[in-house]
């Protein structure tokens, strides 16, 4: 276990090497959030009714909580790095070392998220304070507990899926297009652009059968109290099932890929 | 015996003509490069189309719950999105790859070779590669704009279309100047991909109707980073929403100002260059 702590340490230091770059990413990341909130304000301007049960405050809360969850779970450079490691033959060393590549990358991912969290805590807090009148907290401690549990699973699901996509580099020269195509679907179907329950019910029902809502929307809906009662437990179970499925897929693709691996340049 | 004919050195074009010849050569190599990765080329076009469709579906979802955002109706916003995408794709075709590569050239020290070439360094850095997919995507943006214009029953005249193209060109210059300036930051911090990709977040603002914004946000993205002018002004010209012609002058003025600032920034930055690994 000790070696993995070392990996986490390396991950933190790697991220901090180019801290300006990193800080800039964090800060600029907030610009679209501001824009989206302004857009919704304009839409709610002069209307008194709600949109699919969202008041303006509810809508703003949605995007704020979404930003928090995204900061905690989004994969940002891990997939590109894995794909490059495979393409350049750098993973050869992991085949020789007594370290598991998936575990190693998961540690790096965790370390990256940890640093991001620490850096993003200041702007996020400022934001929440700024919009405090519109911001709502989870109804009770249990809800918050379910939220945390769901966020952890969201992070794992995001990671395993990105990891699997990156492993396609065993077969393909260029994986970035495939990654961007999946990312596009994730972006819209995970609730990044708008809450999924403002979609026509039929579309929302279809989405529930995909892993996408569990990559972002689900924990946010727990926090906001839009998923309550038995639906929370049921949703957590489905989410856990998706995590396990994604994990098994990642393992399977790795074992297939490694047979194809030709250790270029090594 | 006849005296040998005096050998005249080949005449080299100079001035603008010379840069034109160089640029044509750069185009040829770019086309050759793209043709080498045909399937990848097509996949990238598909990726961009998908993202464009995604933005449009966002608008469709919003307008299923409301019929206007301040004074903008659905098809006006679609036309604005088309204009924004068009400008972004033209920018991408000519400049984006080159701006992104600048930080890598600095990190590895390969910028040395660029500095040694007997041409203006900024010219070669900015226009080295052409991304042909950008033109295909710009065409799809145009198609969406034309469809939106028909739904709005607009029939812009020649003057309006030329005006749109001029304003769109000014928008492209703004994107280019700001992105180039951001890429120059890598002279200080070495790794600047974060800055460059951070700029992608700004594109998100360019495609939204300007009247949705108020106060500081609006001023900042009009007078400091003029994102709310880039696509809004050209689109407003087409849908007859301009409150006064001064909006067009503002866009042209800001475009010139951005270009000037980026040139100053570039000159200050390149002085700091110390090369690497040589």
Image (cartoon, coloured by chain):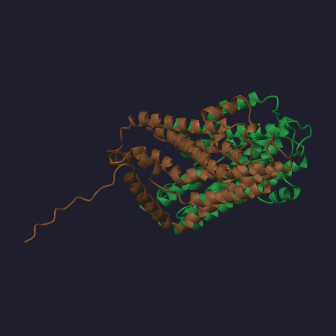
Q: Colour of chain A?
A: green
What residue occupies the far right of the structure in this picture? A49
Q: Is residue A191 visible?
A: no
What residue occupies the far left of the structure in this picture? B1
Q: Residue at x 49, y 55 (%)?
A: A97
Question: Which of B151/B51 is in front?
Answer: B151
Q: Residue at x 65, y 37 (%)?
A: A117
Question: Which of A163/B274 is in front?
Answer: B274
Q: Position of residue A257 (x, y in %)?
A: 56, 66
Q: Position of residue A48 (x, y in %)?
A: 92, 37
B191 relative to B150 in the view: left or right: left
> Is B134 situated above or below B100?
below
> Is B260 situated above or below B68?
above
> Is A180 situated above or below A46?
below
Q: Residue at x 28, y 57 (%)?
A: B11
Q: Position of residue B22 (x, y in %)?
A: 39, 55
How many marks do you count on the picture?
0
B201 relative to B257 in the view: left or right: right
Q: Position of residue A216 (x, y in %)?
A: 74, 48
Quarter holding residue A255: bottom right
What residue occupies the far bottom of the structure in this picture? B1
On the rendered image, what quadrant is the C terminus of chain A found in?
A: bottom left
Q: Is residue A79 visible?
A: yes
Question: Which of A244/B256 is in front?
Answer: B256
Q: Colour of chain B?
A: brown
Q: Residue at x 84, y 52 (%)?
A: A199
């Amino acid at each position: 276990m000790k070696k993995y702590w070392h990996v986490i340490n390396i991950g933190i230091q790697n991220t901090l090497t180019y801290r300006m770059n990193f800080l800039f990413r964090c800060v600029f990341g907030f610009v679209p959030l501001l824009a989206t909130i302004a857009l919704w304000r304009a839409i709610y301007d002069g209307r008194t009714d709600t949109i699919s049960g969202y008041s303006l405050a509810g809508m703003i809360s949605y995007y704020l909580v979404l930003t928090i969850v995204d900061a905690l779970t989004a994969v940002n450079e891990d997939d590109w790095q894995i794909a490059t490691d495979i393409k350049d033959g750098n993973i050869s060393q992991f085949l020789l070392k007594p370290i598991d590549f998936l575990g190693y990358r998961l540690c790096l991912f965790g370390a990256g998220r940890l640093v991001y969290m620490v850096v993003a805590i200041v702007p996020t807090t400022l934001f929440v304070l700024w919009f405090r009148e519109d911001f709502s907290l989870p109804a009770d401690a249990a809800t918050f507990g379910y939220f945390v549990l769901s966020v952890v699973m969201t992070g794992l699901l995001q990671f395993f899926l990105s990891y699997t996509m990156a492993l396609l580099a065993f077969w393909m020269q260029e994986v970035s297009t495939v990654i961007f195509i999946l990312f596009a679907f994730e972006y819209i179907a995970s609730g990044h652009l708008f809450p999924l329950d403002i979609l026509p019910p039929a579309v929302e029902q279809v989405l529930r059968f995909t892993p996408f809502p569990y990559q972002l929307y689900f924990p946010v809906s727990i926090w906001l109290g839009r998923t309550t009662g038995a639906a929370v437990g049921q949703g957590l179970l489905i989410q856990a099932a998706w995590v396990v499925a994604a994990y098994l897929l990642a393992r399977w693709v790795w074992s297939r890929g490694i047979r194809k691996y030709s250790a270029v340049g090594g | 015996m006849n005296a040998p004919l005096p050998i005249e050195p080949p005449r080299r074009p100079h001035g603008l003509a010379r840069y034109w010849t160089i640029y044509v050569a750069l185009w040829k190599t770019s086309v050759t490069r793209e043709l080498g990765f045909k399937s990848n080329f097509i996949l990238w076009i598909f990726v961009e189309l998908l993202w464009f469709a995604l933005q449009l579906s966002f608008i469709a979802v919003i307008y299923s719950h409301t019929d206007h955002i301040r004074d903008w109706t659905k098809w006006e916003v679609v036309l604005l999105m088309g204009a924004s995408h068009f400008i972004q794709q033209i920018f991408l075709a000519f400049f984006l790859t080159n701006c992104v590569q600048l930080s890598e050239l600095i990190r590895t020290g390969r910028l040395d070779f660029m500095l040694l070439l007997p041409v203006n360094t900024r010219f070669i850095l900015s226009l080295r590669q052409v991304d042909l997919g950008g033109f295909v995507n710009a065409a799809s943006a145009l198609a969406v704009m034309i469809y939106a214009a028909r739904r709005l029953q607009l029939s812009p005249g020649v003057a309006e279309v030329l005006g749109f193209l001029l304003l769109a060109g000014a928008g492209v210059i703004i994107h280019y100047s700001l992105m180039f300036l951001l890429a120059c930051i890598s002279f200080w911090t070495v790794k600047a991909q974060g800055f460059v990709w951070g700029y992608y977040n700004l594109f998100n603002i360019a495609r939204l109707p300007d009247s949705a914004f108020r106060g500081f946000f609006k001023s900042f993205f009009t007078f400091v980073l003029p994102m709310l002018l880039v696509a809004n002004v050209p689109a407003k010209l087409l849908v007859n929403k301009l409150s006064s012609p001064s909006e067009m002058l503002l866009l042209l003025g800001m475009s010139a100002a951005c270009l000037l600032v980026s040139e100053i920034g570039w000159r200050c930055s390149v002085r700091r260059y110390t090369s690497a690994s040589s």
